[in-house]
Amino acid sequence: EIVLTQSPGTLSLSPGERATLSCRASQSVSSSYLAWYQQKPGQAPRLLIYAASSRATGIPDRFSGSGSGTDFTLTISRLEPEDFAVYYCQQYGSSPRTFGQGTKVEIK
Amino acid sequence: QVQLVESGGGVVQPGRSLRLSCAASGFNFSGNGMHWVRQAPGKGLEWVAVISYDGSNKYYGDSVKGRFTISRDISKNTLYLQMNSLRAEDTAVYYCAKDRGRISYIFDSWGQGTLVTVTS
């Protein structure tokens, strides 16, 4: 099983700042089959990024993904008030498909 | 637009059964795989099960294999999860999620979730 470790656990930033979230895999993620989801309190997750760097439909271009192998990054170029949430990475290249434990982006 | 509406959650005793439903609209239901993903209170996400676009293939997470059954009714645009032999550790919000393709394991639309609480 591929274990995904996200860091930091919590990121305290101000609106307008840049957020950099890390997702590290215990084994190489095949074909960069990695996705990122955003979840706000009391809401369902929302797909942001798939295939490591492809934005999902309707996702603003301030969200970008990068990485390959075992190291992946989600970057939010300038935080908007609605971006404060929990972010999960997920690998879907190997069975069982697994999620990271999440990174909370909170207002500083 | 895509809409997924789950129902059927509630409080149930350990060892009992429950069936969840997910009514789908706004897309070609017979063209995409469908999943159940759960989230225990205050915890992260766990994939539970998937059914292929035509219902011919079904796969399960190890924690539910042999106890849960996923199915779909194309005529009713509805996804189901039959949960038997429930345990306390099955307590979670259960989301149905649309696959981005036939079975890609990319979840591009989610329902609002239904809470299942297993307690004596």
Image (cartoon, coloured by chain):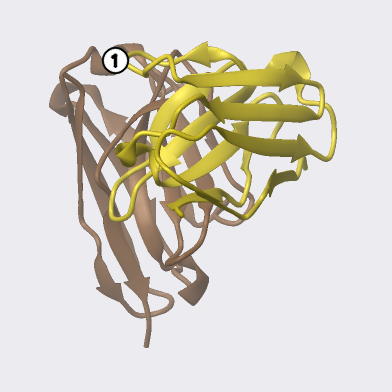
**Residue shown at 14% from the left, 28% from the top:** B76
Q: Position of residue B101 (x, y in %)?
A: 44, 13
Is residue B23 found left or right of A25 in the rendered image?
left
Chain coloured yellow: which letter? A
Task: State the quadrant of the C terminus of chain B.
Answer: bottom left
Q: Residue furthest bottom?
A: B120
Look at the image and tell me whether residue A96 can be seen. no
Quadrant in which residue A21 is drawn? top right
Quadrant in which residue B63 is drawn? bottom right
Q: Which residue is mark 1?
A: B30
Is residue B66 found left or right of A42 in the rendered image?
right
Is residue A105 found left or right of B22 in the rendered image?
right
Task: Write down the chain letter for disc 1.
Answer: B
The local crowd at label 1, few if under 14, some if 14 to 19, many if 20 or more residues have their Cα within 10 Å, is some
Chain coloured brown: which letter? B
Q: Is A51 located above or below residue B43 in the figure?
A: above
Q: Is B67 located above or below residue A44 in the figure?
A: below
Task: State the quadrant of the N terminus of chain B.
Answer: top left
Q: Position of residue A8 (x, y in %)?
A: 66, 50
Look at the image and tell me whether residue A86 can be seen. yes
Is residue A67 found left or right of B68 in the rendered image?
right
